[in-house]
Image (cartoon, rainbow, N blue to C red):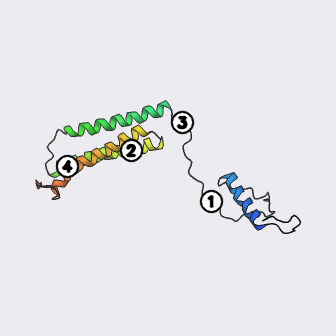
């Protein structure tokens, strides 16, 4: 459908298209209130402003960031391996709670590494972090499930 050239009224669709294009050009930035838009209307100063969008990380990962990330992965993996060699008896009571707290720290370390690797978009360290979280869950399940009656043997919380 063609539009006749001699119409004095502005097209409402053109005004809407201009508004949408102005929003895309600024990507959320507000146009200046003292400059009129194409349709001739000015933006009112009392109009609500949008909250700024969170910025995504666009800069490349540096060697220092990568080294720090792998240091976290190494420390977390070492902690996950060393927890299997817990030197104290942890069958019941307070020693059991201390051991479960240390196992929870394995999961927290995995979560810390997962957040750091996700923000740096580094997939290998993120996979290792998720495996560390899974390892912490497995260690906790080994101690908790027999005490809640899930396993065939029934262990006690109290000594």
Q: Helix, strand or loop at disc 2?
A: helix
Can residue 84 be seen here? The reply is yes
Q: Residue 2 carries which label?
A: none
Where residue 22 appears, as percent x and y from the top left, is 72, 56
Q: Residue at x 37, y 46 (%)?
A: 111
Which residue is drawn at the image coordinates 28% and 38% (left, top)? 79
- Could you tell whether 10 is left or right of 68 in the image? right
CA gap, disc 3 and disc 4: 41 Å
- Please report whichever mark, 2 or 4, sits nearer to the chain's N-terminal start: 2
Mark closest to the chain's N terminus, 3 or 1: 1
Secondary structure under tag 1 reads loop
Tally of marks: 4
Residue found at the very far right of the displayed protein: 6
Q: Quadrant of residue 7?
A: bottom right
Closest to the camera, between mark 2 and mark 4, is: 4
The vertical placement of 121 against 153, above or below, is: above
Residue hosting label 4 = 142
- Alpha carbon distance from label 3 to label 2: 21 Å
Q: Identify the image quadrant of the N terminus.
A: bottom right
* x and y, in percent, of residue 126 in the image: 40, 41
Circle 1 packing at 10 Å, graded few (<14), some (14-19), many (20+), is few
Instruction: Provide the residue designation for mark 3.
Output: 60
Q: Mark 2 points at which residue?
A: 112
Q: Identify the mark at residue 50; answer none if there is no mark.
A: 1
Q: Mark 3 falls on what kind of element?
A: loop
Q: Percent position (x, y) of residue 33?
A: 75, 59
User: In the rendered view, does 121 fall on the left or right side of 143?
Assistant: right
């Amino acid at each position: 459908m063609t539009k006749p050239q001699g119409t004095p009224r502005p097209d409402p669709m053109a005004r809407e298209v201009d508004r949408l294009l102005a929003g895309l050009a600024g990507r959320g930035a507000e146009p200046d209130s003292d400059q009129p838009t194409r349709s001739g209307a000015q933006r009112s100063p009392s109009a609500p402003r949008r909250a700024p969008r969170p910025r995504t990380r666009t800069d490349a990962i540096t060697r220092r960031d990568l080294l720090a990330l792998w240091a976290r992965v190494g420390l977390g993996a070492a902690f996950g391996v060393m927890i299997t060699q817990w030197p104290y008896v942890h069958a019941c009571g307070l020693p059991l709670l201390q051991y479960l707290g240390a196992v929870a720290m394995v999961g927290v370390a995995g979560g810390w590494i997962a957040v750091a690797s996700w923000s740096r978009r580094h997939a290998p360290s993120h996979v290792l972090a998720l495996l560390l979280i899974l390892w912490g869950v497995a260690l906790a399940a080994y101690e908790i499930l027999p005490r809640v009656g899930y396993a065939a043997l029934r262990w006690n919380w109290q000594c």
